[in-house]
Amino acid sequence: MNTNKIIMLLFGCMLTCTTLHSFGKGTKRMKGEKPLIRHYLLKAGIQYGIGKPMNARYKNDLNTPLSYSNNFNFYLKLRLKKISVSGGIRVTSFAIKTTDLQQSTEDSYHKSDFDITSTMKGSTLNVVTPYVYVGYPMQYKHIEVEPFVRMGAGFLNYSLFNVNLRSTQSNVLDQSIFFDDAASQTFFNPSIGVHLSKKLFNFITLTGSLAYDAGNPDKSELLETTIQQNFSVIRKRNIYLQNSVNNANVMIGVELTPFNRIYSNEKKHARYYKKHSV
Protein backbone atom coordinates (compact mmCIF):
# COMPACT_ATOMS: atom_id res chain seq x y z
CA MET A 1 0.00 0.00 0.00
CA ASN A 2 1.54 3.29 -1.07
CA THR A 3 1.89 6.38 1.08
CA ASN A 4 -0.97 8.29 -0.59
CA LYS A 5 -3.47 5.51 0.10
CA ILE A 6 -2.36 5.29 3.74
CA ILE A 7 -2.76 9.07 4.17
CA MET A 8 -6.25 8.96 2.56
CA LEU A 9 -7.29 6.05 4.78
CA LEU A 10 -6.10 7.80 7.97
CA PHE A 11 -7.84 11.01 6.93
CA GLY A 12 -11.07 9.09 6.29
CA CYS A 13 -10.88 7.44 9.73
CA MET A 14 -10.26 10.77 11.46
CA LEU A 15 -13.19 12.35 9.63
CA THR A 16 -15.48 9.46 10.56
CA CYS A 17 -14.45 9.58 14.23
CA THR A 18 -14.93 13.36 14.36
CA THR A 19 -18.40 13.07 12.83
CA LEU A 20 -19.47 10.33 15.25
CA HIS A 21 -18.13 12.36 18.18
CA SER A 22 -20.12 15.34 16.97
CA PHE A 23 -23.30 13.24 16.85
CA GLY A 24 -22.65 12.02 20.37
CA LYS A 25 -22.19 15.51 21.79
CA GLY A 26 -25.14 16.98 19.94
CA THR A 27 -25.64 19.58 17.29
CA LYS A 28 -26.54 23.11 18.28
CA ARG A 29 -29.87 24.31 16.89
CA MET A 30 -29.92 27.55 14.99
CA LYS A 31 -32.56 30.19 15.54
CA GLY A 32 -35.63 29.54 13.42
CA GLU A 33 -35.03 25.81 12.95
CA LYS A 34 -38.13 23.66 13.26
CA PRO A 35 -37.87 21.11 16.05
CA LEU A 36 -37.88 17.41 15.32
CA ILE A 37 -40.37 16.77 18.13
CA ARG A 38 -42.14 19.96 19.10
CA HIS A 39 -45.44 18.59 20.32
CA TYR A 40 -44.80 16.09 23.11
CA LEU A 41 -44.53 18.62 25.94
CA LEU A 42 -45.97 18.03 29.38
CA LYS A 43 -46.93 21.15 31.34
CA ALA A 44 -48.31 21.81 34.81
CA GLY A 45 -50.41 24.92 35.45
CA ILE A 46 -52.15 26.86 38.18
CA GLN A 47 -54.53 29.81 37.79
CA TYR A 48 -56.60 32.12 39.97
CA GLY A 49 -59.35 34.51 38.97
CA ILE A 50 -62.65 36.14 39.80
CA GLY A 51 -66.01 35.62 38.17
CA LYS A 52 -69.51 36.98 37.80
CA PRO A 53 -72.29 34.48 38.49
CA MET A 54 -74.99 34.58 35.81
CA ASN A 55 -77.51 32.99 38.14
CA ALA A 56 -81.22 32.74 37.65
CA ARG A 57 -83.38 33.20 40.73
CA TYR A 58 -85.22 30.20 42.12
CA LYS A 59 -87.80 30.01 44.88
CA ASN A 60 -85.86 28.69 47.88
CA ASP A 61 -86.70 28.12 51.50
CA LEU A 62 -83.98 30.74 52.09
CA ASN A 63 -82.94 33.44 49.65
CA THR A 64 -79.35 32.76 48.57
CA PRO A 65 -78.43 34.96 45.57
CA LEU A 66 -74.78 34.85 44.49
CA SER A 67 -72.60 37.97 44.25
CA TYR A 68 -69.16 36.95 42.87
CA SER A 69 -66.89 33.92 42.64
CA ASN A 70 -63.31 33.02 43.52
CA ASN A 71 -61.88 30.51 41.04
CA PHE A 72 -58.85 28.22 41.22
CA ASN A 73 -57.65 25.94 38.45
CA PHE A 74 -55.01 23.18 38.70
CA TYR A 75 -54.09 21.09 35.66
CA LEU A 76 -51.61 18.95 33.71
CA LYS A 77 -51.47 19.59 29.96
CA LEU A 78 -49.99 17.48 27.18
CA ARG A 79 -49.12 19.46 24.07
CA LEU A 80 -49.58 17.31 20.96
CA LYS A 81 -48.93 18.07 17.31
CA LYS A 82 -52.01 20.18 16.59
CA ILE A 83 -54.06 20.10 19.79
CA SER A 84 -53.51 20.09 23.52
CA VAL A 85 -55.29 17.85 25.99
CA SER A 86 -55.33 18.15 29.74
CA GLY A 87 -57.00 17.10 32.92
CA GLY A 88 -57.45 19.07 36.09
CA ILE A 89 -59.62 20.31 38.92
CA ARG A 90 -61.45 23.63 39.03
CA VAL A 91 -62.57 24.93 42.44
CA THR A 92 -65.17 27.71 42.52
CA SER A 93 -66.43 29.40 45.66
CA PHE A 94 -69.51 31.60 45.17
CA ALA A 95 -70.14 34.28 47.78
CA ILE A 96 -73.78 34.54 48.88
CA LYS A 97 -75.20 38.04 49.25
CA THR A 98 -75.23 38.52 53.01
CA THR A 99 -77.91 41.21 53.16
CA ASP A 100 -80.42 39.17 51.15
CA LEU A 101 -79.71 36.04 53.18
CA GLN A 102 -80.03 38.01 56.41
CA GLN A 103 -83.41 39.43 55.39
CA SER A 104 -84.61 36.02 54.30
CA THR A 105 -83.52 34.52 57.62
CA GLU A 106 -85.36 37.19 59.59
CA ASP A 107 -88.50 36.67 57.54
CA SER A 108 -88.34 32.88 57.96
CA TYR A 109 -87.72 32.79 61.73
CA HIS A 110 -89.46 35.92 62.91
CA LYS A 111 -91.45 35.54 66.14
CA SER A 112 -92.93 38.22 68.34
CA ASP A 113 -90.95 37.13 71.38
CA PHE A 114 -87.57 36.63 69.64
CA ASP A 115 -84.83 38.89 68.39
CA ILE A 116 -82.75 37.39 65.58
CA THR A 117 -78.98 37.58 65.53
CA SER A 118 -77.35 36.13 62.45
CA THR A 119 -73.73 35.05 62.17
CA MET A 120 -74.00 34.05 58.52
CA LYS A 121 -71.20 36.31 57.29
CA GLY A 122 -69.10 34.54 54.71
CA SER A 123 -71.67 31.93 53.67
CA THR A 124 -70.70 30.29 50.39
CA LEU A 125 -71.73 27.86 47.71
CA ASN A 126 -68.75 25.71 46.72
CA VAL A 127 -68.29 23.74 43.49
CA VAL A 128 -65.42 21.30 42.80
CA THR A 129 -65.15 20.20 39.16
CA PRO A 130 -62.76 17.53 37.85
CA TYR A 131 -62.56 17.96 34.07
CA VAL A 132 -60.91 17.03 30.78
CA TYR A 133 -59.85 19.73 28.33
CA VAL A 134 -59.23 19.92 24.57
CA GLY A 135 -57.67 23.05 23.04
CA TYR A 136 -56.50 24.17 19.61
CA PRO A 137 -53.35 26.33 20.00
CA MET A 138 -52.61 29.02 17.40
CA GLN A 139 -49.23 30.75 17.51
CA TYR A 140 -49.02 34.46 16.81
CA LYS A 141 -45.98 36.73 16.94
CA HIS A 142 -45.81 37.30 20.68
CA ILE A 143 -48.59 35.16 22.14
CA GLU A 144 -50.32 31.82 21.77
CA VAL A 145 -54.13 31.81 21.57
CA GLU A 146 -55.93 28.57 22.35
CA PRO A 147 -59.73 28.20 22.13
CA PHE A 148 -60.86 25.31 24.33
CA VAL A 149 -63.72 23.15 25.54
CA ARG A 150 -63.81 21.63 29.03
CA MET A 151 -66.08 18.77 30.07
CA GLY A 152 -66.48 18.28 33.79
CA ALA A 153 -68.64 16.91 36.58
CA GLY A 154 -69.42 19.44 39.31
CA PHE A 155 -69.89 18.62 43.00
CA LEU A 156 -71.80 21.34 44.86
CA ASN A 157 -72.03 22.04 48.62
CA TYR A 158 -73.53 24.92 50.56
CA SER A 159 -71.73 26.33 53.58
CA LEU A 160 -74.16 28.35 55.73
CA PHE A 161 -73.16 29.51 59.18
CA ASN A 162 -75.21 29.58 62.36
CA VAL A 163 -78.25 31.64 63.17
CA ASN A 164 -78.83 32.66 66.78
CA LEU A 165 -82.33 33.43 68.06
CA ARG A 166 -82.45 35.47 71.26
CA SER A 167 -85.69 35.69 73.18
CA THR A 168 -86.95 39.00 74.56
CA GLN A 169 -88.93 37.10 77.20
CA SER A 170 -86.43 34.65 78.68
CA ASN A 171 -82.92 33.52 77.81
CA VAL A 172 -84.06 29.97 78.50
CA LEU A 173 -85.82 30.13 75.12
CA ASP A 174 -82.70 31.26 73.22
CA GLN A 175 -81.99 29.02 70.26
CA SER A 176 -79.30 28.29 67.70
CA ILE A 177 -79.90 26.96 64.19
CA PHE A 178 -77.38 24.92 62.19
CA PHE A 179 -77.48 23.93 58.52
CA ASP A 180 -75.79 20.75 57.37
CA ASP A 181 -75.31 20.01 53.66
CA ALA A 182 -74.41 16.35 53.99
CA ALA A 183 -74.86 15.25 50.36
CA SER A 184 -73.15 16.93 47.39
CA GLN A 185 -75.18 17.68 44.30
CA THR A 186 -73.55 16.24 41.16
CA PHE A 187 -74.19 17.86 37.78
CA PHE A 188 -72.73 18.38 34.32
CA ASN A 189 -70.44 21.44 34.42
CA PRO A 190 -68.94 22.19 30.95
CA SER A 191 -66.96 25.30 29.90
CA ILE A 192 -65.92 27.09 26.76
CA GLY A 193 -63.31 29.83 26.49
CA VAL A 194 -59.92 30.95 25.26
CA HIS A 195 -56.51 30.34 26.85
CA LEU A 196 -53.66 32.82 26.29
CA SER A 197 -49.99 32.16 26.97
CA LYS A 198 -46.74 34.11 26.75
CA LYS A 199 -43.38 32.43 27.36
CA LEU A 200 -41.31 34.26 29.97
CA PHE A 201 -38.37 31.91 30.54
CA ASN A 202 -37.28 28.49 29.37
CA PHE A 203 -39.51 26.65 31.83
CA ILE A 204 -42.10 29.31 32.79
CA THR A 205 -45.05 30.60 30.77
CA LEU A 206 -47.46 33.35 31.82
CA THR A 207 -51.09 32.39 31.15
CA GLY A 208 -54.52 33.95 31.16
CA SER A 209 -57.97 32.71 30.27
CA LEU A 210 -61.51 33.88 29.67
CA ALA A 211 -64.18 31.26 30.23
CA TYR A 212 -67.88 30.66 30.68
CA ASP A 213 -68.78 27.77 32.98
CA ALA A 214 -72.33 26.42 32.68
CA GLY A 215 -74.18 24.45 35.33
CA ASN A 216 -77.73 23.90 36.53
CA PRO A 217 -77.68 21.52 39.49
CA ASP A 218 -80.77 20.12 41.13
CA LYS A 219 -82.05 21.35 44.49
CA SER A 220 -79.73 21.02 47.45
CA GLU A 221 -81.30 19.47 50.52
CA LEU A 222 -79.95 20.81 53.82
CA LEU A 223 -80.75 19.50 57.28
CA GLU A 224 -81.79 22.31 59.59
CA THR A 225 -81.28 21.59 63.28
CA THR A 226 -82.54 23.92 66.01
CA ILE A 227 -80.95 23.55 69.45
CA GLN A 228 -82.20 25.27 72.60
CA GLN A 229 -79.58 26.18 75.21
CA ASN A 230 -77.07 23.71 73.72
CA PHE A 231 -78.79 20.64 75.11
CA SER A 232 -82.28 20.21 73.67
CA VAL A 233 -82.96 19.58 69.97
CA ILE A 234 -86.41 20.98 69.37
CA ARG A 235 -86.68 20.68 65.59
CA LYS A 236 -85.12 19.03 62.58
CA ARG A 237 -86.31 19.65 59.05
CA ASN A 238 -85.05 19.71 55.49
CA ILE A 239 -84.79 22.98 53.61
CA TYR A 240 -84.18 23.33 49.89
CA LEU A 241 -81.82 25.70 48.10
CA GLN A 242 -81.25 26.04 44.40
CA ASN A 243 -79.26 28.40 42.18
CA SER A 244 -77.90 28.27 38.69
CA VAL A 245 -74.09 28.30 38.82
CA ASN A 246 -73.38 29.72 35.36
CA ASN A 247 -70.18 31.68 35.81
CA ALA A 248 -68.23 34.05 33.53
CA ASN A 249 -64.66 34.40 34.78
CA VAL A 250 -61.21 35.78 33.99
CA MET A 251 -58.07 34.06 35.33
CA ILE A 252 -54.30 34.49 35.33
CA GLY A 253 -51.54 32.05 36.25
CA VAL A 254 -48.38 30.25 35.21
CA GLU A 255 -47.45 27.05 33.41
CA LEU A 256 -44.28 25.10 34.19
CA THR A 257 -42.56 22.83 31.66
CA PRO A 258 -40.23 20.68 33.80
CA PHE A 259 -39.08 18.47 30.90
CA ASN A 260 -38.50 21.13 28.28
CA ARG A 261 -36.58 19.02 25.76
CA ILE A 262 -38.02 20.03 22.40
CA TYR A 263 -36.01 17.25 20.73
CA SER A 264 -36.14 13.74 22.13
CA ASN A 265 -32.33 13.73 22.09
CA GLU A 266 -29.46 15.34 20.22
CA LYS A 267 -28.49 12.19 18.28
CA LYS A 268 -31.91 12.05 16.67
CA HIS A 269 -31.64 15.77 15.93
CA ALA A 270 -28.26 15.26 14.24
CA ARG A 271 -29.43 12.29 12.19
CA TYR A 272 -32.55 14.17 11.16
CA TYR A 273 -30.63 17.17 9.83
CA LYS A 274 -27.99 14.98 8.21
CA LYS A 275 -30.71 13.10 6.34
CA HIS A 276 -32.46 16.26 5.16
CA SER A 277 -29.32 18.14 4.27
CA VAL A 278 -28.15 15.57 1.67
Image: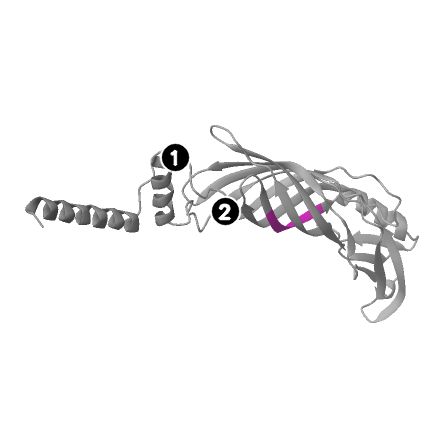
Quadrant of the rendering where the C terminus is positioned? top left
- Residue drawn at (79%, 55%) of the image: 185
Is 192 positioned to the left or the right of 171 in the image? left
Q: Residue furthest top?
A: 141
Q: Residue furthest front?
A: 1
Up-down relation of residue 176 to residue 144 (above or below) = below
Up-down relation of residue 143 to residue 93 (above or below) = above
Picture coordinates of residue 54 (x, y %)? 76, 37
Picture coordinates of residue 186 (x, y %)? 78, 54
Up-down relation of residue 113 to residue 245 (above or below) = below
Badge 2: few (under 14), some or many (20 or more) residues near its Cα, within 10 Å? some
* Magenta segment boundaries in residue numbering: 86-94
Is 63 positioned to the left or the right of 9 in the image? right
Picture coordinates of residue 228 (x, y %)? 85, 66
Determine which residue is flagged by label 1.
33
**What's the distance in space between the residues labelled 2 and 1, CA to CA?**
17 Å
Determine which residue is flagged by label 2.
40
Which element is circle 1 on? loop
Q: Quadrant of residue 214?
A: top right
- Residue drawn at (34%, 44%) of the image: 270
Question: Would residue 54 be visible to someone looking at this image?
Answer: yes
Magenta residue check for 263 = no
Which residue is at the front of the view, 237 or 35? 35
User: Which secondary structure type mostly characterizes the magenta part of the structure?
Assistant: strand
Say which mark, if any, is on residue 158.
Answer: none
- Residue drawn at (88%, 59%) of the image: 238
- Residue drawn at (78%, 39%) of the image: 55
Q: Which amino acid, mark 2?
A: Tyr
Which residue is at the front of the view, 158 or 254? 254
Which residue is at the front of the view, 118 or 63? 63
Q: Which amino acid, mark 1?
A: Glu
